[in-house]
Image: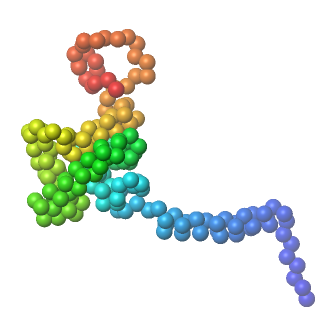
Amino acid sequence: MKTEIVMNRREAIKKTALLMGAAVSSSAILGVLNGCTPKPGIDWIPTFFTEDQAILITQVAEIIIPKTETPGATDVGVPGFIEQIIKETYTKEKSDLFLQGLGEFDLTANERMGKSFIQLDPEDQQSFTIEIHNAAIAEKADQRPFILVMKELTMLGFFISEVGATQVLQYKEVPGEYKGCISLEEAGGRQWA
């Protein structure tokens, strides 16, 4: 005796879609999980920097502008912005200087602290970065030291982001009038974006 299974068209389409979706989504999920996953410590996929360089850039950027009551540098994508600037706007000579400075920064950390910068605990990373920053400001070098370039790029990336321009700086799309020389308090307590 045969048992007939009666299925209407709508139910057949649903079951086919479910079956196809499971086949496609499992392979897609597997590809995503095995493919382009960032190394722990970064939330972006570097295309110019090595993974260790990207982690170092991310950690230094977060030291320069940490997350407080407002998002930090990494929250607004500053490390990826820095990579894009170095990769797309710097000359070969200038990008090589940046990479050389990055390498020297890490080498100095290794010599002074006994570990690579990215292997240091956050407190040691911060104290080392502050020490290098203060030394760079104190000395007058022919070339701008890596840490000062890094600080400049971090601040640029942060303050041109939507968060930096609207949550940290004052922002009005079209200010009503121009007041050239007023006190900070009269301007609302914050600089204009």
**Residue drawn at 32 percent across, 29 percent down:** 169
Q: How is the image coloured?
A: rainbow
Q: Position of residue 37 (x, y in %)?
A: 44, 62
Q: Position of residue 32 (x, y in %)?
A: 52, 64
Q: Is residue 146 above or below residue 51?
A: above
Give the mark count. Answer: 0
Q: Residue at x 14, y 57 (%)?
A: 108
Query: Image point 22% across, 16% down: which residue?
Result: 183
**Location of residue 175 with respect to 104 vertically, above or below:** above
**Residue with the most extreme front position:** 93
Q: Is residue 21 above or below residue 148?
A: below
| Residue at the extreme right of the image, as rendered | 1
Q: Residue at x 19, y 53 (%)?
A: 105
Q: Position of residue 119 (x, y in %)?
A: 22, 63
Q: Is residue 78 visible?
A: no
Residue 47 seen in the current view:
yes
Camera-side residue: 103 or 118?
103
Q: Quadrant of the N terminus?
A: bottom right
186 on left or right of 25 = left
In percent of width and height, residue 26 lies at 59, 69
Picture quadrant of residue 147: top left
Nearer to the camera, 106 or 59? 106
- Vertical position of residue 127 compared to residue 169: above or below: below
> In which quadrant is the C terminus drawn?
top left
